[in-house]
Amino acid sequence: MEYNKIQLGAILSFIFLVQNIQGWGEEGHAITCKIAQARLTEAAADAVKQLLPAYANNDLSSVCTWADRVKFSLRWTSALHFADTPPKLCNFQYARDCKDLNGVKDRCVVGAINNYTTQLLDYGKDTQHNLTQALLFLSHYMGDVHQPLHTGFTTDKGGNTIDVHWYTRKQNLHHVWDANIIETAEERFYDNNIDEYFKDIQKNITKTWSDEVADWEACSSDETTCPNVYASEGVKDACQYAYKDAPEDATLEDDYFLSRLPIISLRLAQGGVRLAATLNRIFQ
Ligand code: ADE
Ligand code: ZN
Ligand code: ZN
């Protein structure tokens, strides 16, 4: 088949567009889910194994971006990937912020995490919910809520409308946080091997952060999951690190990369630890 220039241009812009509206990129989600699956109790590991589709081969990380792929066919789910707040307030308030563009309440990543957690509590009972889908949604959204620009500002769509340069390449700030920082880290420090980055984060969980992990896992009183906390931390990180020194047209390079990478590693770790803690509480 031959394409003329305009057709090719249209195809390339479509691919570019699709590539630009993912959650964490494929790699961020895979890391979060790998960390989580390795921390499951026997009961939770067993339930996850039962619920995963056969094609996943009992590997949760292989289906952690499924929710991004169904955004277009299941249109109502597209608002469930983020929870933006009014600009510069730097705090998250569920009643004010958890709604979609039409103002429908509870339609945001925090509401979605609560909802799919509740659905999964039906495991082992007669239920009308599709618990396989609930598991895949929960595993994905737990990653998203830890990406600081998924709790960004409504006015710039979590950095999607802020054009910057990532070193020499044109990008938007949101995509820098979804994918570029992780990719650059893998190229520069991990021999282009995502598994090496994953192992390094796991090592930090047992060493550098070992004193904090119990705090990450804990929710107040009788809650199974606490996404309000995760989103509140996220918007603080968005203000302190993501938006800071990254206005429209900025060129982001080593200074930005090296100071923000530790935040990304921490958020990937917290996302994985909390996904495991939530699943362990669900499938007791
Ligand atoms: N669309 C609007 N806000 C968004 C965000 N924070 N993340 C991803 N997509 C969005
Ligand atoms: Zn997403
Ligand atoms: Zn994203």
Image (cartoon, rainbow, N blue to C red):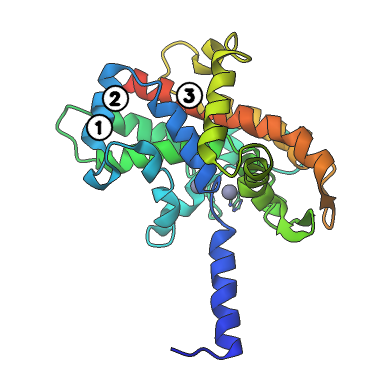
Which residue is located at x 24 percent, y 27 percent?
A: 47
In the image, taking residue 218 as reference, residue 53 lies left or right, namely left
Residue position marked by numbered label 3 in the rendering: 274
Which residue is located at x 40 percent, y 39 percent?
A: 61
Q: CA distance from mark 3 to mark 1?
A: 19 Å
Image coords of residue 207 (percent x, y): 59, 13
Q: Earlier in the sequence, mark 3 or mark 2?
A: 2
Classify mark 1: helix, strand or loop.
helix
Residue position marked by numbered label 1 in the rendering: 49
Instruction: Confirm or deny contact between disc 2 and disc 1 (CB under 8 A).
Output: yes
In the image, taking residue 88 as reference, residue 281 lies left or right, namely left
Q: Could you say which quadrant of the image residue 95 lies in?
A: top right
Q: Nearer the viewer, residue 39 or 101?
A: 39
Q: Earlier in the sequence, mark 3 or mark 1?
A: 1
**Mark carried by residue 252:** none
Classify mark 2: helix, strand or loop.
helix
